[in-house]
Image (spheres, coloured by chain):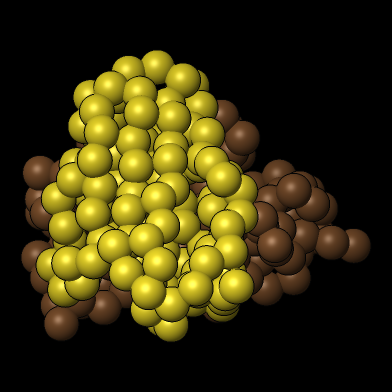
Amino acid sequence: DIQMTQSPSSVSASVGDRVTITCRASQGISSWLAWYQQKPRKAPKLLIYAASSLQSGVPSRFSGSGSGTDFTLTISSLQPEDFATYYCQQANSFPSTFGQGTRLEIK
Amino acid sequence: EVQLVESEGGLVQPGGSLRLSCAASGFTFSNYAMSWVRQAPGKGLEWVSTISGSGGNTYYADSVKGRFTISRDNSKNTLYLQMNSLRAEDTAVYYCARPNYVDYTLYFAYWGQGTLVTVSS
């Protein structure tokens, strides 16, 4: 199985900050990667698919990059509604696997 | 509007069984692979199972293989997850999920509201 490792596990930031979260796959997955945002007691929300494609309706301050084994999610200017937990997911092969999550907290 | 509505979960004893359903609307159900994803209390997301649009292909996480069965009834626009031999570690919120596009099986753009399954004596 492909292991997905996110870093950091948690990060504190302020409104307006630029934040980057990284995700590393244990083997190459080309661009088969998604990023999700999850708020407490809510279903996850797809932000980015195919490593860098912005899902419809997602603000442009979210962007994704990378291919192979190393990927990043960047939020260019944090907004109050962005404080949440973020997960990466590999969609290259079954079993699909998620990273352990990165909790983005208000500083 | 795409809607996915899961049935109620519940409390089940270890070794017991439960069937979840997910009623879909707002799209051509048979065109899309469908999946179940779960989240244990306070934990991360875990992919559980996927079924192709026709139902002819199914995939499972090792943690549930041989115990859970995914199925679908395209005439009823409904997805199912039959869970047998339940264990305490199956306690989680279970979500059904649909990909954003037909060609992408595992990019989950649409999610149900989630249903809590608790396995405990």
Q: Residue at x 61, y 48 (%)?
A: A9
Q: Would residue A66 appear left or right of A13 to someone viewing this image?
A: left
Residue A43 shows in the view: no
**Which of the 4 image quadrants contains residue B108?**
bottom left
Residue B102 shows in the view: yes
Q: Residue at x 26, y 72 (%)?
A: B24
Q: Which chain is brown?
A: B
Q: Would residue B45 appear left or right of A56 to someone viewing this image?
A: right
Nearer the observer, A105 or B25: A105
- Counting labels gives 0
Q: Which chain is yellow?
A: A
Q: Position of residue A39 (x, y in %)?
A: 50, 74
Q: Position of residue A36 (x, y in %)?
A: 38, 58
Up the image or down, A25 lies above or below B81; here it is above
Nearer the observer, B40 or A88: A88
Residue at the extreme top = A27
**Which of the 4 image quadrants contains residue B99?**
bottom left
Q: Would residue A105 appear left or right of A51 to someone viewing this image?
A: right
Q: Position of residue B107 (x, y in %)?
A: 26, 50
Q: Residue at x 84, y 61 (%)?
A: B120
Up the image or down, B19 lies above or below A43; here it is above
Q: Residue at x 32, y 69 (%)?
A: A77
Quadrant, the N terminus of chain B:
bottom left
Q: Position of residue B21 (x, y in %)?
A: 43, 67
Quadrant, the C terminus of chain B:
bottom right
